[in-house]
Amino acid sequence: MRKRPHPVLPSARTGLDFAVLSAPTSTQRHVAVLVGSLRKDSFNRKIATLVAELASTSLALKIVEIGPLSLYNQDEDSAPPESWTTFRSQVSAADAVLFVTPEYNRSVPGVLKNAIDIGSRPYGKSVWDGKPGAVISVTPGALGAFGANHHLRQTLVAVNVPAMTQPEVYIAGAGSLFDEKGALTNERTRELLKKFVQAFGLWIEANIRPPAAGA
C-alpha cells in the first residue's frame, strides 16, 4: 500500500536564513490579506487567521473582505460603488498584500480575480502597483492548489506585485489539519507558516517602495 503524502507540501529549499529573519524591525508594516474563499468555515480563512497570529509585532495582518464587491464593470469607473472605493482604500493603505486561495478548476476563484481587477482600475491608478506580495494556496485535495498558486502569480506580474518566490506554501489535505473547534493540530504546518511569515517580513523590507519626497 502506498503511503499517503503529508498534507503540507513545502518548498524543497528556501535559500533563506531564518535566524536572520527573526530579527525585529523598528517599523510595523501593514499587510492586506485577501482570502479567495467566501465559505463560512473556510480552510483558507483559518490559515490566513493563523498566519496573522504567527506574525511578529513588526507585521500587522488584516483580512480585507472581497465578498461584498460587485462584478467589475468599466462603465462604473466614473462613479464607482462604495464597496469598490472602500476596498481600494484598504489595499492602498497597506504596505504589502498576502493572497490565501483555494483552487477552482485549475485557477483562482472568480471572486478573487474580480477583486484584483477592481483594485487595478481605473487605468493608471492601480492599488497593487509595486506592493510586495505573497501567495499561500490551501485545499482539501492532494496537490496543494498548485494550479491556483501559479496562475495567481501570473496575474500578479501583470499588476506589478513582486511576489515572494521562496518559501513556497501549498497546503493539501486541509480537512485533516484542524480539530472540531477550528484549531490547527498539525505542528509541521504551523512551523512552515512561521517560517513563511518570517520570510515574508524580510521580503517586504527588501521590496517596499520608499516614501515619495515630501510625503
Image: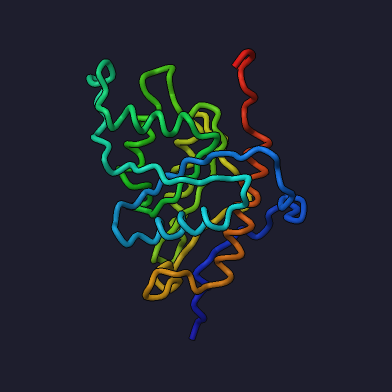
Residue 62: % across, % down: 46, 45
> Which quarter of the figure is the C terminus placed in?
top right
User: Up-down: is 154 above or below 92?
Assistant: below
Work out which residue is located at the far bottom of the displayed protein and give it. 1
Q: Is residue 15 visible?
A: no
Q: Is residue 108 left or right of residue 128?
A: left
Left-right relation of 38 to 5: left
Left or right, 7 with reference to 14: left
In front of the other: 110 or 122: 122
Q: Is residue 51 above or below residue 114?
A: below
**Which quarter of the figure has residue 178?**
bottom left
Tally the numbered discs: 0
Q: For this rendering, which residue is in front, 147 or 122?
A: 122
Compared with 187, 123 (above or below) is: above
**Any part of residue 56 in sight:** yes
Give whichever of 5, 67 is nearer the camera: 67
Which residue is depicted at the point 38% across and 29% down? 88
- Residue at 46% in and 62% down: 143
Residue 139 falls in image quadrant: bottom left
**Which residue appears at 41% of the width and 51% of the height?**
101
The residue at the point 47 percent across, 40 percent down is: 32
User: Horizontal and vertical percent for residue 127?
Assistant: 45, 27
Q: Position of residue 10 (x, y in %)?
A: 59, 61
